[in-house]
Amino acid sequence: MSKCILAINPGSTSTKLAIYEDMKLLFAKTIRHGEEDLNRFRRLADQIPFRLQAVKTFMEENGFDSASLSGVAGRGGLLKPLQSGTYEVCEAMLEDARTGVFGEHASNLGSILAFEIASEVGIPAFIVDPVGVDEFIPEARLSGFAGIKRKSQLHALNMKAVSRKIASEIGRPLDELNFVVVHLGAGISVAAQKRGKLIDVNNADNEGPFSPERAGTLPLKQLISLCYSGKYTEKELIHLVTRRGGVCSYLGTKSVMDAEERALAGDAEAELVLRAMVHQIAKEIGAMATVLDGEVDGVILTGGLAHSDYIIVRIKKRVEFLGNVYVFPGEEELEALAAGALRVLNGEELVLRYSGQREEVR
């Protein structure tokens, strides 16, 4: 019997939705939320009724009854460090997502929205490969300063999904392959994936290459001086380096497409900024190749920026000496959510509880 899955991926200014029958896409929509709508909510959790109504309207518009669903999969947010896999939503997870105890991020709403829809009709709600997937080897946790611990935060959902597809194309199990996996988006994740485990990665929110809106790793002494300059509050400076950094800080735009157009029209500053971003991405790829002891079965480039020939051609030129470079543009997050839920519902994979123990799904 076929199974229908509702997939929910909340972003900072959008909610992406899709309904799948097994892995056949039936309906999909990206709902954009204006700043005026979101600014009236003091906290992220206050958006739940607003976003929930958007999900229900999507289903009504497509004439789809929630009673026809077999499960709901929401994007997993900033939760306690977890191994990769599919988790059934539970009260402990919901509490951590609502309170933002591990950090505030729009993806925290995914488990909550999934549970709200699923509980109305008595079906399971899941998250799949959440942002906080942590498969670090011990030496990757040390930052270089006692008291500051490196944390795994990455685009695990898309990176794992694309890795599975590439492994399938190669015709080998993922747990036999080593990849450097790169998600190129508003934030950039570059991970060393050893036999299916993400053993090291730059924290996509505050480490690694600069991106369209994030500053990435910064010179430490200069950053400390800026913190004590009196120019910014802590909140203002965090906003600047995570939302107005990178390409945006140099060129005043978060759009790499706009930056490319300027570069191609002869804007030397735009060309330099893009060249520097490529330089930092390639350098991080090389670093992660050393984490894999140079045993690299391929480099995977994915995410929204992978649509840019300008960026991809320049990255490939620098890193193709490592081996095959696989380009998988865009994000497979909605499909990956549905696939994770289906693997559990079809008995192909054991569900994970938030405690981390494996059990059969009820």
Image (cartoon, helix red, strand yellow):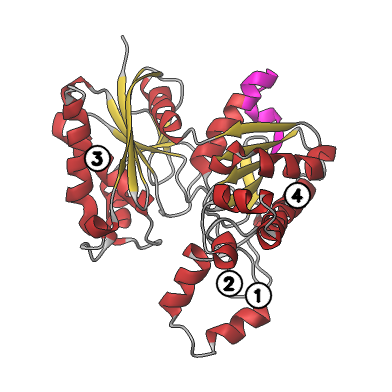
**Going by the image, does 56 lie left or right of 8?**
left
The residue where tag 2 is placed is 148
Q: CA distance from mark 2 to mark 3?
A: 34 Å
In reply to whether residue 236 is colored magenta, the answer given is no
The amino acid type, in three-letter code, at marker 4 is Val
**Of pointers 4 and 3, the one earlier in the residue sequence:** 3
**Of pointers 4 and 2, the one earlier in the residue sequence:** 2
**Going by the image, does 151 lie left or right of 48?**
right
**Of pointers 4 and 1, the one earlier in the residue sequence:** 1
The amino acid type, in three-letter code, at marker 2 is Ile
- Helix, strand or loop at disc 2? loop
The residue where tag 4 is placed is 291
Tell me what residue is drawn at x 78 percent, y 37 percent: 296
- Helix, strand or loop at disc 3? helix
In reply to whether residue 176 is colored magenta, the answer given is yes
Number of marks in picture: 4
Q: CA distance from mark 4 to mark 3?
A: 38 Å
- Vertical placement of 216 versus 88: above or below? below
The residue where tag 3 is placed is 115
